[in-house]
Amino acid sequence: MSRFFHSVDKVIIADGDDVRRAPMAAALLREFANNDPLFRLWGTKVESAGTGETIVEGASPVTKAKNTMLKKGVNISSHKAEKITFDDIQESSVILTLTRKQAEDVLKNVLNYYPSYQTKIIPMLDYLGIKDWEFPKLIGATQFVYSEFVGKMESVLPLFKIKFKQDTYLPLLVKGKGLGVGIIKGPVRIIESDVQVGEIEQGDVVVCSTNDVAGLLGRAVSEVGAIITESWSELGELSQTSYKFNIPCISSTSHPADVLQNGELVLLDAITGSVYGYPSANMPIKTDNLPGQEPKLSLADILKKYNIKPKES
């Protein structure tokens, strides 16, 4: 399981009937998310629901909505209208209504039963920081107005990425003293005895309790991407191993084998002595390494590329 933290896991876009604006908006956000590597990494689910009392559950989107979306290459004909439920409110990270009145209507019901959930229900434009316009109404509207709605929705999609990034960070898992200079991404390999040395693969971040890593690992030390140990000796075997083999190391850590998991991807920063959780999904990071080389990535480059800040708590 990835320990990449992102708090916006499920979004519900709510409108009165769930056959016009809501399924169109949800489909556009899903399509945008599917084409963006960071959205795919987050795995945010996007659904739609209706808030009106007279909603026809199971109804298909109206023809104008389906035709407008087909022109965008998105088919919403399989969508079935659903009325928003308390389970939806409980399970979602945020419920975005397409008008401010809809948010007020949902809040009236929610506050009676789940007052702590009121912060989840927000008009979409308020959530995105847009104050000077509203989405057009589509009941009785022409095909042109449907297209106008889609255009406005498309114009705000990039703002979702900015908003979601505010809730994204790499968690600090282990803190110790750094040896050597280097930042590397790699899978954790916990070594408790010399019997396990044969399991080491190129680029593994080896976790062990001894300072004499070279003695424990033997020839396999040249395969290691980085080393994490509990013990500390500034002039001892570990520092010599780090210098001789140019391996980033972190020592004087507290029970790393209990915190880290075999196979878990981590980002080790020997400069600060920090080990961060890293997403297990395939984040597309370009490097200048030659084929066959284990990539040693720059933490600064990764975080700058995706505008993500590490947090220690």
Image (cartoon, rainbow, N blue to C red):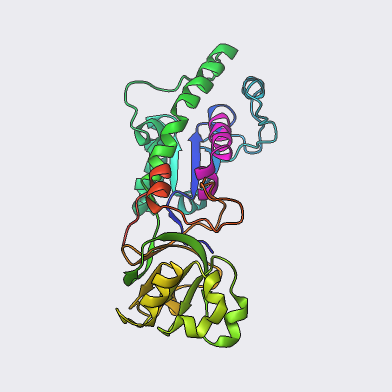
Q: Is residue 236 above or below residue 201?
A: below
Q: Is residue 30 magenta?
A: yes
Magenta residues (range): 23-42
Q: Is residue 75 above or below residue 1?
A: above
Q: Residue at x 67, y 23 (%)?
A: 70
Can residue 43 be seen here? The reply is no
Q: Nearer the viewer, residue 86 or 219?
A: 219
74 relative position to 124: left or right: right
Q: Residue at x 33, y 32 (%)?
A: 129
Name the residue at the right extreme. 78
Instruction: Look at the magenta stretch and give its main secondary structure.
Output: helix
Q: Is residue 166 above or below residue 13?
A: below
219 relative position to 267: left or right: right
Query: In the rendered view of the protein, which quadrant contains the C terminus?
Result: bottom left
Query: In the rendered view of the protein, which quadrant contains the N terminus?
Result: bottom right
Q: Quadrant of residue 177?
A: bottom left
Q: Is residue 56 magenta?
A: no
- Residue 138 percent coordinates (x, y): 53, 20
- Residue 229 percent coordinates (x, y): 40, 78
Q: Nearer the viewer, residue 71 or 47?
A: 71
Q: Is residue 39 above or below residue 145?
A: below
Can residue 190 be seen here? The reply is yes
Q: Nearer the viewer, residue 247 or 282?
A: 247
164 relative position to 83: left or right: left
- Residue 42 percent coordinates (x, y): 50, 49
Name the residue at the front extreme. 244
122 relative position to 265: left or right: left
Q: Nearer the viewer, residue 95 or 242?
A: 242
Q: Residue at x 56, y 78 (%)?
A: 219
- Residue 161 percent coordinates (x, y): 44, 38
